[in-house]
Amino acid sequence: MLDPVSDLRVLFIHGLESHPQGTKARVLGDHFRTETPAMDTRDFEACVQVQAAAIRRFRPDVVVGSSFGGAIAVALLQRGLWRGPTLLLAQAAALQGLRPELPTGVRVWLAHGTGDDIVPPAASRQLARTGSPSLVRLLEVDDDHRLRAAVADGRLVTWVRELAAAEAASQADGASRHLRVFVQESTLWPVLITVIVGLAAILAFGLSTALRTRNPPLLLAVAALAVGSAEFVRRDWRGRRPGLVGGALLGLWALAIGLAVGAGRYGLF
């Protein structure tokens, strides 16, 4: 599961009368790697394109849209321009003429203040009844349209972290489930063993050759693989040990290192 770390990439879409230096943007920027593109809120379609371009460039982990920005986020979801976890804050999709519908298969959380006198909470209640029920969550809080209290007491940051963690956990569980089915199928064991040994041999060859020749590009490639693997295992951590996928990755590295040491000793590579 993804830990709530500061390098989480968050794309924040500001509201109608806000800007990239607004309170929410600054708070999110204090806790995450945040990008808040400037946009001309007088042109809805242009705003959608600005945010679509930011998604392609920035590759966020989470998109957060506030009020008018929430409407932009809904448009991105409806058009398939974004399919990742999304937090909608007092979203104003209905006020922009968008249909009250979320796509299925996307994790979307909606936060709305019961004291909102600009966008009625009923708009988020209606939207929350669409999409995939297991992925859509409505958070009604005692707050105003700007969600001032939720921003001030840290709930906004907590929502983003929990949303990202829920998405990461779901993806890791899905990968583990597929691998578990594969492992439990006895007729596929020869294939699994062949794949593991083959990957370990390739990795061992890369390790041995990189250390022996001190080839900079090869050393860099091996280092990148090691860092990427360590990061994956860290995100897959469950309590005191990694999950099935993380454990398999650790085992692959252990086997590869053993093969590399043996090959180096006997001059096999």
Image (cartoon, grey):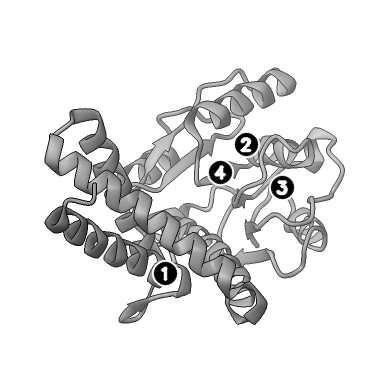
The type of residue carrying mark 3 is Val
Q: CA distance from mark 4 to mark 3?
A: 20 Å
Crowding around mark 1 (Cα neighbors within 10 Å: few <14, some 14 to 19, many 20+) is: some
The type of residue carrying mark 1 is Ala
Point 68% across, 18% down: residue: 46
Label 4: element kind: strand
Q: Are marks 3 and 1 in contact (CB under 8 Å)?
A: no
The disc, 1 or 2, on the residue closer to the chain's N-terminal end is 2
The disc, 2 or 4, on the residue closer to the chain's N-terminal end is 4
Q: Position of residue 155 (x, y in %)?
A: 44, 62
Residue behind mark 2: 69
Residue behind mark 3: 119
The disc, 3 or 1, on the residue closer to the chain's N-terminal end is 3
Q: CA distance from mark 3 to mark 2?
A: 13 Å
Please tell me in which quadrant of the rendered image residue 237 appears: bottom left
Between tags 4 and 1, which lies in front? 1
Q: CA distance from mark 1 to mark 2?
A: 41 Å
